[in-house]
Amino acid sequence: MKKVLLQTDKLSKSFSSGGNLQHVLKNIDLQLYAGDFTVIMGASGAGKSTLLYALSGMDTPTLGTITFGEKNISDLNSDRLAMFRREHCGFVFQQIYLIDGMSVMDNVLAAGLLVNKDKKSLVRRAEELFQAVGISGETQKKFPTQISGGEAQRVGIVRALINEPQILFADEPTGALNSKTGADVLDTLTAFNEQGQSVVMVTHDMRSARRGNRILYLKDGAILGECDLGKYVHDDRARHEKLSKFLNEMGW
Amino acid sequence: MVTIFILVFLAALMLNLWLMLSMDYHRNFERYHDRLHAQHVTLVVDDDSEEMHDFLTRELGKNQQTNEFDLGDALNMPGSFLYNGGEMNHDFVISEKEEALSRSIGRVEITEEGEGKSGVYLPLLYQSEDIRIGKTIDITIAGNKIPYKVCGFFNSIMVGSHNCAMTEIILTDDKYQELAKLEYAQNATMCCVRIHDKMESQNYEAWLKDALSGRYPDARILSNTYLLVRQSRYVAASICSGIISMMAFLVLLIALVVISSNIMNYIAENMKNLGSLKAIGYISRQLVNSLMLQFLGFSLLAAVVGTGGSYMMFPYVNAMLASQTGIPYQTRFLPLPLLLTFAVLCGAVAVVVCLSSRRMKRVEPMVALRQGIQTHNFKRNHIPLAKSRVPLNAALALKTTFSGMKQNIIIGITMLVLSLVVVFSGVLIENMLVDSEPMVNLIVGETSDSCINVNLGKEEEFCEEMDKDARVENYYIYHYENVIHEGGLELLAMMCDDFSKTSNQDVVFEGRAPKFDNEIVIAAKYAKEQGLDIGDEMSIIAGGNEEKYMISGFTQISNQLGKDCLLTREGYERIGELQNVSYYLNFRDNVDIDKFNEEVKEMFGNEVNATINARATVKSGVSVYISIMTIIVTGILIMSVIVIAFVLYLLVRTMLNRKKQEYGILKAFGFTTRQLVLQTALSFMPAVVLSTVVGIAGNCAIINPLIALFLSGVGVVKCSFAIPVGLITVSGAGLVLLAFAIACLLSVRIKKIVPKELLSGD
């Protein structure tokens, strides 16, 4: 029996646009499990990112609840949500969003020092993570504009993991990278997932989606279907076909 | 742009106000002088005989400078009345109403009058809650209190204020005749002379008094000149004008720094657009011109509104200053100050736009298109978090501080300017509002509790009585007489039997007070004008006698606007004979000065010529300056708050725009709004604290020379005002806290930045 990390109950999100109310998420009931690599797919406008905002506490739902462990986070104010995010969530963005004015190491420590006041242990963890993603000590001293896109995204992953989050949210993490660099980043995410890190990733890309063990397909603000791919194995053709078939059924 | 508009608006308002004050307000004196066909030299002598009239007519006719003159009858007696809560002492020139109105030279004009047909008309300056038409006031004339009903007020340009060496009051015919018949009434001749070159009025006055005292050595003479009165009636206006000009240029400087920063930010943020425009064929000059047009148009609009504001404000400034000038002023449209204001503002803005947009010329289209914004200099990682010992929020704030040198420079300049305002206000508050004695000591020189003038025959007896009286703490001679510097001007001589007894030992700021009968101390301003130095000899004339004196020091007291000197009593008696002598008395605590003076009058009768409650007189005279300074200090402090608020508004807004994404990233990773607000506000603090500390320390060092410069017009060359270190430190700390609070308040907009905007859309 998998442990439920986060669950939603009739999660809805609406926006007012030009006087019309748009229902972007409609009564979503969902459970995210510890250790899973959950991938959220869907066509443009299906509500993938909106669902990610809501699940990660970046946004509040219009209706319904989101429960993290025993805690209802849907009613928290913005500062409480920030505190929730710093303690429980990590984020990897498509555009990476490292802070230009800080060195690579400082980008990571700025997030880490929010939670862990023990600077020595924090620096040690950062260095371990950097080593794990292949970022050298020299690169750690550089500024974001002085490193490559692939390196930057791996730094982004280290930053997201520095506080040992219970869930790592990734929003199109390979969207701004070439295929080789993108594969490296996915390898990194997969490696961390294999070590027990829960990951929720939004993607358009089927090759990226293959890394997940659980695929959710969103259409018009509702979960249309779900596919269990099982543990990721590199170059597993059957797994690829299963995903293709699922996506075909979903009308992708 | 709102910040720039308001700063240029404030600069235009004050610049135009200053130009109106300096270019036209003073000319108001000339206008009234011409309108009332006023004299350039006034001389009142205690003798109305035919012989005196003949002598004056003959002598005036001899001088080529004499254009026309008028000899009239008047009464001349010392006196006082209550004004501004204190006793105002004057040398009264009392005229009959019709005589004063029909004088061919120096006539007066009634500005307001009531129904009363019998009573007194007073100079316009004294119109107040306590002195108004229909009210009966007590006027003490030659020691006798006489009630008079106030019938009206008048404007007299040369003798309409206690700043004119004499004050004219007008009585209706019945009251004049009544007074003239009294035993103590002193008839006098009032001589009003217009000369060809009014700038020679002081030399002419010296010549006339010399001639008169040569023929009538015992005559009591009062006199003033066009130059003296013009300057003395506008002392407050000059100080106010100086302060406004200083503030105008400081605000303009801040506005220019803000404009420059705005342009540089614009270039940095629009590098790609500028590159695109250049790529399609726009040349640098066209791009600079578009900026020039934008900033000039905007500044001109702000300047138009600002100069409009100065016209709305001018009546209030006028009302404030009229309490010192006593001359009515009608606000009117003044094109020259307006054009000058526009020219200075637009010229300064144009230069700054040109200089700040130079970088635009160096933008290469392809480089700009590739690079876009280069906001950081990556030469050094300031405050590395792994090694830093400061808390996280402070460390991130310091990183922002080190990455924003332009921001630090703007803050630095602003805080340096505002720290000057703090120091200036602190010194004014300490030396004028809290305790006015330092300012009084600087301008007036010596003050005491009471001043009593006693005839020479009773001097010994008077001193014996003072020695016996337990209420008297100390007393000494402090007597004023006019003397003439041979080849120079008339000087007001202050004589003392022993200058070491005086309360104010700072009267002589260079050299030492006269000790021997051949020594003299002169006003530094006059010494500079005449090319005299300590150790030089100068000839002094009084009562037709002339003697040489050696200059032993310089003073800067300003009773005669820098035409002052100090002599020992023996020194004066080498040339002049005293008829009476004034003593300054200081009392022990809780002595009723008025009661003491009354007792002395009763004891000595007519042998005492005047008893003055000097404490009340000074209080009354200083109260006008105190109220003007209170308004000025309040005004500049309010403006400081406005300036700091707007400069920080601009900087915070720029920072929020520039770092919007960074704030979003930090929020996504769990930084709260409160932490980011704190970081933002703290990032300004190093520059704020450093420039405030440097500014306050530096300005404390220069404030005395700076104030001396402001007061140089009244003869002050050196100031040694106490600098209230405690008050200034607290004010500086207050300024820093205010900056922090404003930065925090303005940064609350960070709350609106939401991290979800960073995520890619669906």
Image: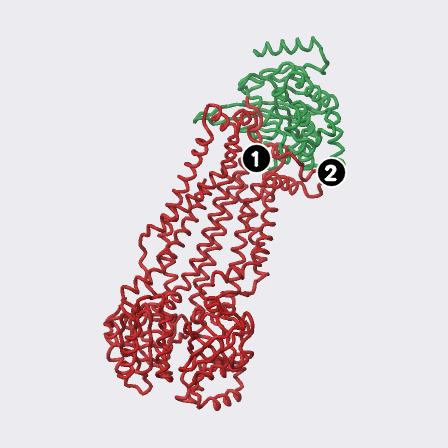
Q: Is residue B200 above or below residue B336?
A: below
The quadrant in which residue B63 appears is: bottom left
Which chain does the residue under circle 2 lie in?
A
Residue B516 placement, left or right of B133: right
Q: Nearer the viewer, residue A126 or B496?
A: B496
Element at badge 2?
A: helix
Q: Quadrant of the N terminus of chain B?
A: top left
Three-letter amino acid code of the residue under disc 1: Lys
The location of residue B577, given as percent across then percent down, is 43, 85
The location of residue B743, given as percent across then percent down, is 55, 45
Please give the residue where the numbered disc 2 appears in the rendered image: A119
Rendered residue at 27%/78% (across/down): B57
Q: CA distance from mark 2 to mark 1?
A: 26 Å
Which chain does the residue under circle 1 lie in?
B
Chain B colour is red
Q: Nearer the viewer, mark 2 or mark 1?
A: 1
Q: Nearer the viewer, residue B232 or B98?
A: B232
Three-letter amino acid code of the residue under disc 2: Lys
Q: Is residue B33 visible?
A: yes
The quadrant in which residue A65 appears is: top right
Q: Is residue B112 visible?
A: no
Residue A102 placement, left or right of B625: right
Q: Residue B659: which numbered mark, if any?
A: 1
Element at badge 1?
A: loop
Q: Is residue B474 above or below residue B737?
A: below
The location of residue B170, given as percent across then percent down, is 29, 75
Chain A colour is green
